Image: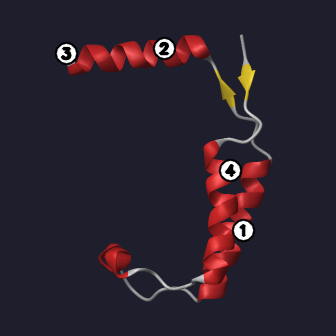
C-alpha cells in the first residue's frame, strides 16, 4: 500500500523559509558559532534556498506504512 502526501513538511519548510529570509537576511547570533569562514552574500543565500524549494517540488514523497512501523519497532528494541 502506498500513501502520497500533498505537501511534505520539508517542502513547506523551505517554501516558507525563503520568504522569511527575504525579510531578514542576517544570521541570528545563536547560529554564528556554527558558521566557518566568510558568509556568502544574502542574495546568494536566498537564491540557494529558492533553488532547493524548486527541487523539492519535483519529489514525489512516498511513505510505506509497513517499513515505517518496522523501523519504529527496531528503534524501540534498541532503546529497551
> Dot 1: few (<14), some (14–19), or many (≥20) neighbours within 10 Å?
some
> Which residue was labeled with disc 3?
80
**Image height of 34 relative to 73, above or below:** below
The quarter of the picture where residue 48 lies is bottom right
- Residue at horizontal 35 percent and vertical 80 percent from the top: 32
The quarter of the picture where residue 36 lies is bottom left
Dot 1 lies on which element? helix
Label 4 to label 2: alpha-carbon separation: 23 Å
Label 2 to label 3: alpha-carbon separation: 17 Å
Which image quadrant: the C terminus?
Answer: top left
- Residue at horizontal 66 percent and vertical 80 percent from the top: 22
- Residue at horizontal 57 percent and vertical 83 percent from the top: 24
Label 1 to label 4: alpha-carbon separation: 11 Å
> Which residue was labeled with disc 4?
11
Label drawn at residue 8: none
> Which residue was labeled with disc 1?
50
Q: Earlier in the sequence, mark 3 or mark 4?
A: 4
Amino acid at each position: 500500500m502506498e500513501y502520497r502526501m500533498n505537501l511534505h513538511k520539508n517542502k513547506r519548510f523551505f517554501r516558507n523559509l525563503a520568504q522569511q529570509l527575504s525579510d531578514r537576511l542576517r544570521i541570528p547570533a545563536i547560529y554564528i558559532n556554527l558558521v566557518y569562514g566568510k558568509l556568502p552574500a544574502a542574495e546568494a543565500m536566498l537564491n540557494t534556498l529558492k533553488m532547493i524549494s524548486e527541487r523539492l517540488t519535483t519529489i514525489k514523497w512516498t511513505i510505506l506504512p509497513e517499513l515505517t512501523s518496522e523501523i519504529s519497532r527496531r528503534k524501540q528494541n534498541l532503546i529497551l
